[in-house]
Image (cartoon, rainbow, N blue to C red):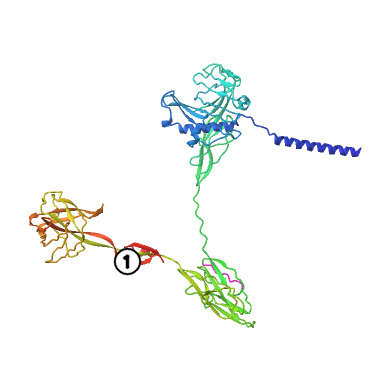
Amino acid sequence: MEKEYQISWLKIIGITVLIAVVIVLICLLYPKKDNTLLTQQTYISNITLMKDAGFEYFSGSHLPKDIGDSERLSLDEMLARNLIVEFLDEEGNSCHTQNSYIEATKTMENEYEMSVYLSCDNKSDYIVTSISNEVICTDCNVIDIDSNKSDVKDDEDEKPVYTDNNSNNNHTSSNNSGSSSSGNSRPVEIIQNTNVNINYVDSCCTNGNNSNCNDNCLTNVYHSVQFDSNGGSFIHTQIVKHGGYATYVEPYRYGYEFLGWYLNGVKYDFSTPVTEQIVLVAKWEKKEEQKPDEPDDETFIVDFDSNGGTHVDSQEVVENGEVKKPQNPTRECYQFVGWYKDAALTEKYDFSTPVTSDMTLYAKWRDDGSCDSNVYRVRFDSNKGSDVATQWVEEGDRAYEPKDPKRDGYEFVGWYLDGKKFNFNTRIYEDITLEAEWDREEEKYNKYCKVEEDTYYSISYVSANKDKWNYSWQVRFYDLYNVQDLKVVDAGYLTTTSMYNKAYQESYDKGIVMVGSTGKYNVPVTSGSMLKEHSLKSNNFGFSVNIPYYTNGYWYTDLSVNIRNYNNLSPYYASNLGSSIYFVPFYFNVKYTNLDKCTTDKASNRYKYDDYEIVDTFWR
């Protein structure tokens, strides 16, 4: 009997385990499907997002012009205008972008009504209409929307349509069995324009004035909870069922600490039931400016060249710190003497010296006489580079390759012996000297030329047949002559009857002006003929010249001349012109680059050449 009892318990345990496994498999293979109405919060949030996009878009020129007119914005256009991000239904499918839209209707002057239509690709397909601010069946009580399962459609080809006529509050809905009157219990979805409440309302009133309402006909009300982040990151509006609770979210604002959400100046308690639309405002406190961390003390690297002895680790030492004296290295047949500052081993290092830069210390050795083998010297000629310590190598051993020396403006190539690059695997049987080879680093150079300023002189002429009172006659000057002996006469300045003229430079072969007490002005004219004589009477005219400028291939200047004794100016006859001309000297200053005064220097020395222009750049 005892054996049978034990077997029965084993069977019971086995059957129990088997049943549990079967239940788990069933749950995994056939998960429970949530058939609630389009997942209320997701659905309501999508409606609200479209509504918010509509409020943003429908303003100014986008609003309908005349009463009764409507303007429509499809979900596809909302996405294209970045007014909304693409959303999905409860099973992850996209909603219709053309069949879903927002419509704004002008109801009266300065008043508009906005409707939201949403259609999604799944078993839960909806067209939802928002009506105006009128509250339907205000005496109705609140129930749970989940109890109305009739809003879920089974046939994908059929869509329940809920409409509301705002003028008389008579409601109709189309369903699988056809249309029914306002007594039908299927709900109409209402989105109110002003307070963003979303109401699920039964058509419970039998007339259009909200009277004779059925007490058993109930409404499910939702409220919006808006978040004013007060300069912080954007927080989406939450749609909360009447009597439900808002979800705490925390915004971010650079340089501030978030203190909480406030309602009417009082910190909001998120355990408070929501019974109306509310706007929560973020409160911030500016953080104290954090002073930047003090920079770490600068550190330097101290290397140890043991000159053939055992390895000694480098040290990192803070600025003005001291090097910690390491354990003495060892070397066969030699006695350690100490650490030296230079590779030539002439200056012993004092370990109490403050460190102010990177450096290398060199070990010095003394032959202790314990070895009979010959020792040879390997010297390093750095060829104007930094010092490299001499090595002492036993006969048949190899020298070790030291750290590369440094030389300003040059790149180290290698160590050479008798013109050939030295191989440090070579065994040493005699004293040798290795020489450093360098390649000059290229550097940028500029050619600098002096910028100078000179006074240039010219002679202009006036034809004798010009009327002295004619304000339009031109004065031409042919060339710039750097002739210091030719001076401008300081005569009377301009009067109110001054004649203003434009002077310009013409193309011709360059001539020479020769000056002297009895000399002649040798000036070529347009035809190439020469003046034969001259007589300038400085008492008979006066003039002034403004600073010239260059444009369109010509020099221009405003030249004002007041000829007091016009007829007393000496004429100059040019045979091929057939007329007399009168000459007036004047001058102006010109800056130029003197290519005869140039120098070549490094580009880095540009600051030395403020009065020079760079005319060439090269590397060498």
Q: Is residue 131 above or below residue 436?
A: above
Say which of 555 and 254 sits in front. 555
Q: Is residue 415 magenta?
A: no
State the image coordinates of residue 525 (x, y, percent, origin top left): 16, 58
Q: Is residue 186 visible?
A: yes
Q: Is residue 386 visible?
A: no
User: Label 1 crowding class (10 Å Cα cut-off): few <14, some 14-19, many 20+?
Assistant: some
Q: Which residues are magenta?
A: 320-327
Counting the numbered discs, the total is 1
Residue farthest along the right direction in this orientation: 1
**Residue ID for mark 1:** 598
Relative placement, left or right, of 502 versus 390 is left
Relative placement, left or right, of 554 versus 34 is left
Q: Helix, strand or loop at disc 1?
A: strand
Q: Is residue 385 above or below residue 206?
A: below
Q: Is residue 207 above or below residue 326?
A: above
Amino acid beneath label 1? Cys
Relative placement, left or right, of 513 versus 82 is left
Please state, as top left, top right, bottom left or bottom right, where the N terminus lies in the image.
top right
Picture quadrant where residue 542 is located: bottom left
Please state, as top left, top right, bottom left or bottom right, where the C terminus lies in the image.
bottom left
State the image coordinates of residue 269 (x, y, percent, origin top left): 57, 36
Look at the magenta stretch and give its main secondary structure.
loop
State the image coordinates of residue 563 (x, y, percent, origin top left): 11, 54
Q: Is residue 326 magenta?
A: yes
Say which of 469 and 605 sits in front. 469
Say which of 65 and 366 sits in front. 65
Picture quadrant where residue 200 is located: top right
State the image coordinates of residue 545 (x, y, percent, origin top left): 19, 55
